[in-house]
Amino acid sequence: MHGSLGTSQNAPRLQQEKGKLPVTALGNRFHYLSWEPHQSPHTVAAAGFAYDSTLGFAEHYGFRHSYCLPFYPFNFEVGKAFEFLEIPLHVMDATLHHPNYLQLAPHEILPALVPMFQEIERFGGVCTVLWHNENFAPRIKKTGLGSSKN
């Protein structure tokens, strides 16, 4: 599920959104990668998600928690892990091309990401990619991201 803006700190609203879906949502990623470390884990847990994949950077790609494996966030209030799995986000398409972020040309994207991919492979990790549906067309005029062969 894609928790809407404001739901990362509002468990009742997130639960309400989840309840409107015609199927059971197992996972979540908050809009704009919104995450408040003291509240958002409780919100995800209260909504009953099996996993979340919000923890990543919008401004650049890489390891927000210096980690490339899914993990159970720790709940310091009760001294044990939350029951949902956090699957860290490592790269988002908008990070690569958006005017407010890296502004990479299509031919620069893969060479820029290869060192991160190699580091993930070195540790037997998982690379999580957020690629918005508007960038799946064969040729996106707005960004040029439809082809990595440019």
Image: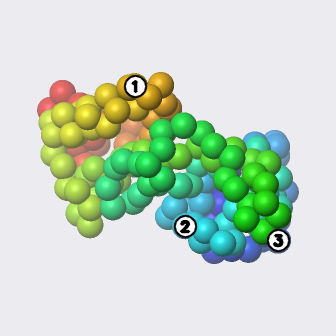
Q: Earlier in the sequence, mark 2 or mark 3?
A: 3
Q: Nearer the viewer, mark 1 or mark 2?
A: 1
Left or right: where 24 falls relative to 102? right
x 60%, y 39%: residue? 70
Q: Compared to 92, does 128 lie above or below?
A: above
Task: Tell me which amino acid carries mark 2.
Answer: Ser
Residue 44 position in % (x across, y down): 73, 59
Q: Are marks 2 and 3 in contact (CB under 8 Å)?
A: no
Disc 3 versus disc 1: distance between alpha carbons?
Answer: 39 Å
Q: Amino acid at mark 3?
A: Pro
One can see residue 83 in this view? yes
Q: Which residue is mark 3?
A: 12
Q: In the rendered structure, which disc, 1 or 2, sits on the residue that comes first in sequence?
A: 2
Q: Position of residue 65 (x, y in %)?
A: 48, 53
Residue in view at x 70 percent, y 62 percent? 41
Left or right: 62 as drawn, with respect to 70: left
Q: Can you tell which quarter of the image residue 111 is in?
A: top left
* Residue at mark 2 to residue at mark 3: CA–CA distance: 16 Å
Element assignment for label 2:
loop
Residue to which mark 2 is pinned: 34
Q: Does 23 appear above or below 44?
A: above
Amino acid marked by disc 1: Glu
Nearer-N-terminus badge (3/1): 3
Return the residue at label 1.
Answer: 121
Q: Secondary structure at mark 1?
A: helix
Left or right: 61 as drawn, with respect to 48: left
Q: Which-is-in-front pick, marks 3 and 1? A: 1
Give whichever of 7, 116 is nearer the camera.
116
Task: Compare residues 95 and 4 and report the one nearer the observer.
Answer: 95
How packed mark 2 is, by other alpha carbons closer than 10 Å (few <14, some 14-19, many 20 or more), is: many
* CA distance separating discs 1 and 2: 28 Å
